[in-house]
Amino acid sequence: MIGAHHSQQGPRSWIFVGLRWLAAAIVVGLLLYFLPLAPLRAAIARVPASRFLAILAGYLLAHCLGIAKWKRVVNAAGAQLDFATSAQCYAGGLFGTLFLPSIIGGDVIRLAVGLRRSPRPAAVLAGNVVDRFLDVVAQAGLVLLGLILLPGSLPAELEAKGRNVVVAAAGAVMLVLLLGIALHRPLLGGRSIRFRRGLARLRHAVRGVSRRSHVLLIGWLAGTFIQMTFLVLAAQIATYCGLVLPLRAWLFAWPLAKLAAILPITQGGIGVREAALVALLVPFGAPGHVVLAAGLIWEGIIIAGGLIAGATAFLLRRAGAKDKAT
């Protein structure tokens, strides 16, 4: 029965991925339909291959710091993972976000290896949750910084929308926390002793990493630096395409576009990110077709990085298997 269930779920998952890629193609197609194609192609052509590869190298280096951050956070929870295993988890997650069927992106792939390799699987799960939380806080911090720097240069309506997004996100987090507290007893009622023990280990791991304030601070600073690096690289691509905007405009628009891409509409947020970026930067006087050109090139960076990450995870897996065999 279990095997039959999985055999049914596999095709359904791939159908789900196909629909999300189709949705991405529709969103990008609509953008191409409403924006002039000739200037768009000209803007893309301004970016030579050497600059594309340089941006890709910077993108991958930032993710190397992301591996170190993830390893430090999960090990603070007690995961006891080495760097090679952490790199395999992290790189597999990057690949899975774009190319594998998963409702919550690459986290399933990232956790799959860590849960097998760690003597304390609950610590891997808890550390990954904390790491994701630090990333969200880093994104929100960039949005707030952009809002602080923008008064007077941002249309009042767009500034209000940006504040509303931040307030709505904070409200959603508070709502989830309150619901968790309110439903704590009903959800745990009648659960098995094994389930309760697993939950207790997870809670203990979360408390363990939360007590290490220096790890949380370093993780947040590293996450902010990584997101800022992505922002600067994307702004540099736009400069190559012929678009020059103040950094404060990117500080406002880029994190909001990335948050919009989290919505499970398209695979990896492709299309949604570009549409949000166009909508957010056009009020600053940016030509929509140039913004889209920069966004499409950035998607090329993400896809190329995902493929390299997948190959890296595969090679690390084979190396680990050889070490075990010897």
Image (cartoon, helix red, strand yellow):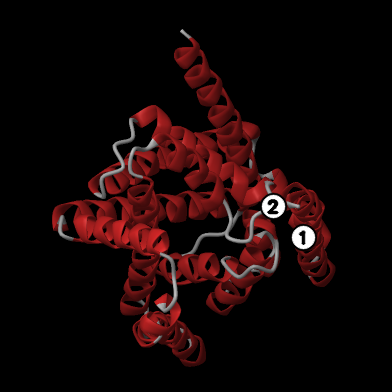
Numbered label attached to residue 101:
2
Q: Nearer the viewer, residue 240 or 104?
A: 104
Residue 96: x and y, percent? 61, 46
Q: Which of 286 and 161 is in front in this view?
A: 161
**Other-residue count near label 2 (Cα within 10 Å), few / some / many at <14 / 14–19 / ≥20:** many
Residue at the image point whose x is 51% and y is 38% from the top: 91
Where residue 203 sits in the image (x, y, percent)? 29, 63
Q: Judge by depth and name the residue closer to the eye, 16 or 51.
A: 16
Q: State the residue at coordinates (26%, 45%).
A: 78
Q: Depth check: 185 or 124 in front?
A: 185
Which residue appears farthest toward the top when viewing the image? 326
Callout 1 secondary element: helix
Name the kind of residue labelled 1 in the image: Phe
The picture places residue 216, in percent across and down from the top left corner, at 22, 57
How many labels sit on residues?
A: 2
Question: Residue at image x 43%, y 40%?
Answer: 114
Residue at figure coordinates x 55%, y 20% from the top left? 318
Horizontal and vertical percent position of residue 228 = 38, 55
Q: What residue type is labelled 2?
A: Pro
Residue 4, which numbered label? none
Q: CB under 8 Å between callouts 2 and 1? A: yes
Using the image, determine if residue 248 lies above or below residue 178: above
In space, the residues marked 2 and 1 are separated at their CA atoms by: 7 Å
Q: In this view, does 135 lie to the left or right of 50?
A: left
Q: Name the residue under label 1.
A: 16
